[in-house]
Amino acid sequence: MLAEKFGLKHLQTGETLRGIIKSGSEFGKQIAEIINQGGFVPYQWVIKISKEEIAKLDQDQGIVMDGFVRKLPEAKEIHKTLAEHNRALDYVFLIDISDEEAIKRLSKRRICKKCCRLFIVGTTIDKNETKCPDCGGEIYQRRDDTPKGIKKRIAEYKKETLPVIEFFKERGDLIVVNGEQSVGEVFEEIVSHMK
């Protein structure tokens, strides 16, 4: 929605990683194994991938980055990476939800094994659907999208990502948005902070 409103390129780390997985490359297989075990892709890989994606863009193309940064070394690297491309970090938004809401939402997520499209049970697919409406591939639930797996990821988030939040807060960059509102309300709250 932000990309559409402001003419920005949407760089979504998760989508980029799914594209690499879908390629069937050895690197994609390594990423899939880490993600399917509920782990985070090593930050060095994420930085490298993000740098490559930024380098592909025209200089005057604005960016909205989604899912990056998650670890402190990434947070420290982002300013350097952007500066290398004559860019600056204008806003850092934390769309904040409770642990309970995260469990509720992620427990409904499903993915197509063939095209990697994401689905939400009860929203984009029926709970009994097993085939992707786009490509016919098998729809599955990631092992880490169960309540047990999600709790493990939340613990990892608190260990790895809370220092990132503190880093941006100390710099005066962080804007916290209530993520438990409707999508439209979250969007309007974000836009209200943008010049």
Image: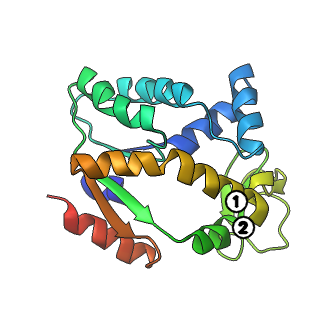
Quarter of the rendering containing residue 36:
top right
The residue indicated by pointer 2 is: 107
Residue at horizontal 48 percent and vertical 23 percent from the top: 48
Mark 2 near mark 1, Cβ–Cβ under 8 Å?
Answer: yes
| Residue 13 at least partly seen | yes
Picture quadrant where residue 68 is located: top left
* Quadrant holding the N terminus: bottom left
Q: Is residue 28 above or below residue 185?
A: above
Query: Which element carries disc 2, helix, strand or loop?
Result: loop
In this picture, residue 175 sits left or right of residue 150:
left
Closer to the chain start, of discs 2 and 1, is: 2
Give the residue type at disc 2: Ser
In the image, is 23 to the left or to the right of 4?
A: right
Amino acid at dot 1: Ile
Residue at image position (71%, 68%) is: 108
Local SS, label 1: helix
Q: Quadrant of residue 129?
A: bottom right
Residue appearing at x 73%, y 27% in the figure: 30
Residue 8 makes an appearance in the image = no
How far apart are the two marked residues, 2 and 1, measured between alpha carbons? 8 Å
Most foreground residue, 5 or 13: 13
> For the residue carrying disc 1, how many other residues have a C-alpha within 10 Å: few (<14), some (14-19), or many (20+)?
many
Q: Nearer the viewer, mark 2 or mark 1?
A: 1
> Percent position (x, y) of residue 11?
43, 41
Tell me where residue 50 appears, x and y as whole percent: 45, 30
Q: How many marks?
A: 2
Residue 94 percent across, percent down from the top left:
38, 59
Which residue, given by chain and number where applicable, does mark 1 sit on?
150
Badge 2 density bin: few <14, some 14–19, many ≥20, Cα 10 Å: many
Outermost residue, left side: 195
Q: Nearer the viewer, residue 2 or 43?
A: 43
Q: Quadrant of the C terminus?
A: bottom left
